[in-house]
Image (cartoon, rainbow, N blue to C red):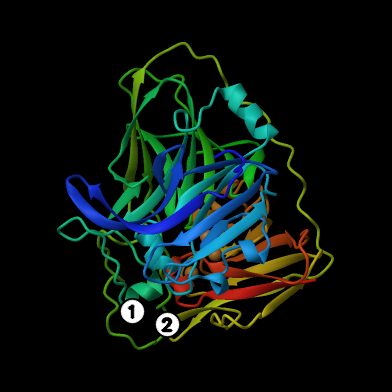
Amino acid sequence: MADAAGAPTIVAKGIEHPLLPGKPARLLAYEMEFQGRSLLNPLLRVRSGASLRIKFWNGLNETSIIHWHGLKVDSNNDGHPHYAVPGGATYDYRFTVANRAGTYWYHPHPHRLTGKQVYHGLAGFFIVEDDEELALQQVLDLRLGETDIPLVLQDRRFDEAGGLVYAPTADERFHGHYGSEVLVNWTPRPYFDATARIYRFRVLNGSNARIYRLAFRHEERLVDYHVIGTDGGLLDRPHAVTEAFLAPGERMDVLLDLSGGARGDAITLVSLPFDAMHMEMAGSHAAHGQHGAHGHHDDRSDGLEIELLRIRVQQKTPYDRTIPETLSRIEPAPESPFSPRLILLDQSRMAWRINRASYDMTATPIVVRRDTVEAWDIRNFQPSMPHPIHIHGFQFRVLSRAGSPEQQRLLAVTDTGLAATDLGWKDTVLTWPGETVRIVTDFSHPFLGDQVYMVHCHNLEHEDGGMMLNLKVAA
Ligand code: C2O
Ligand code: CU
Ligand code: CU
């Protein structure tokens, strides 16, 4: 989408589409007319600095609103649940894309319905480009959709007719809703025919609750790949890794160099097994009888090994590009003059909380002053489970991880415990049980008056269950 002159309309509506071959399922999708064609969950591609007008038309029979995940917009344009509109109504967005180049996304955000609506299909990419980004595309000869490939990972559960099932039990509302099949761009068991060259994958974890430990495997070996960007765009330079965690809401931009590959090579993007650390029950004597999925693993459990995408090298053509040494001029992390604010994650009677509170639409338990820099210590209690914590309206930096489990500690590339995927600008950060993750955010913005955003867990069942607080940036 170029700089829209008129206001394109995005309609959230029910559609029929076979996710499993030959089995049409009732889904939800965002539909947009573009040059006489109707696009579903359109990838929006905009230039940094562009002014956008977008009309949202809620064609569902329940409330909804679009949230632009990662974008620095004012509260009127953020898609805060307070602005959710009923079925049949519209909402007009008008904002300037202030973000640097990066892989952002959009999804619904009505209170208590986010998990259900995302699960049924509502989500799309929002890709921002700027000069640095275009330079990288040039250097590596990348073309979006061909050699620069957005991948959204979403696990789903199907009934016999191939329809989606989303009816979380009390237990699933507490742990999160896991599916037995992982779809990549709505496709089960996908494969991809490649040539022997460098590819870029922009991976979005669009799952409700599942965390992935991403690696590329060739035969029995793991292949190195390069993390070049995170939630808020390019890193200063590529970081070679063999694996990385990606939690719901997070994005990871990577390069995979297949230029040394031979025809017939098969590389698989997998999620390696890991300890899901669902330890929320250990040491707690909360009474609940239906704790089925815990203690034994079925194919829905988090942390299982999963094959996500098969890449087959089909062609060998001359290719002489190499991974550049530098990518971007990234600013240093802002510095806060204050001691860190504590953000405590815990639970009480099967409800996850932030600073011992559950979501209340009208309360603003966190107030920060505009134009100040704050460090936050996000402390996940022990026993607990992993929580990916997300802030609306700003990008932050991760400064340190303390108390990390070994599987996270082993990925550290800094002496403060950060993994390559913690570098650069972030809007969502995974916190494991027992961990304290320090982040720093500059709450400067160009808007008039108080702005109300939010902080929440991006496990969508946790979010819908109230693991979410309003965050006021007071003018
Ligand atoms: Cu992607 Cu408030 O979330
Ligand atoms: Cu968001
Ligand atoms: Cu959570």
* Residue located 46% across and 50% down the image: 124
Residue 391 is situated, as x and y percent measured from the top left of the image, at 62, 64
* Residue named by callout 1: 170
Q: Nearer the viewer, residue 47 or 208?
A: 47
- Give the mark toward the camera: 2 or 1: 1
Q: Nearer the viewer, residue 63 or 353?
A: 63
Q: Nearer the viewer, residue 475 or 170?
A: 475
Picture quadrant where residue 129 is located: top right
Q: Image height check: is 395 above or below 363?
A: above
Residue 324 is situated, as x and y percent measured from the top left of the image, at 63, 26
Residue 351 is situated, as x and y percent measured from the top left of the image, at 46, 81
Screen quadrant of the N terminus: top right
Q: How many marks?
A: 2
Q: Residues within 10 Å of mark 2 (few under 14, many from 20)?
A: some
* Residue named by callout 2: 350
Q: N-terminal of the two: label 2 or label 1?
A: 1
Picture quadrant where residue 447 is located: bottom right
Disc 2 to disc 1: CB gap under 8 Å: yes
* Residue 275 visible: no
Q: Nearer the viewer, residue 4 or 397?
A: 4
Residue 33 is situated, as x and y percent measured from the top left of the image, at 44, 45
Residue 74 shown left or right of residue 182 in the figure: right
- Furthest residue in direction top, as rendered: 318
Q: CA distance from mark 2 to mark 1?
A: 9 Å
Residue 152 shown left or right of residue 312 in the figure: right
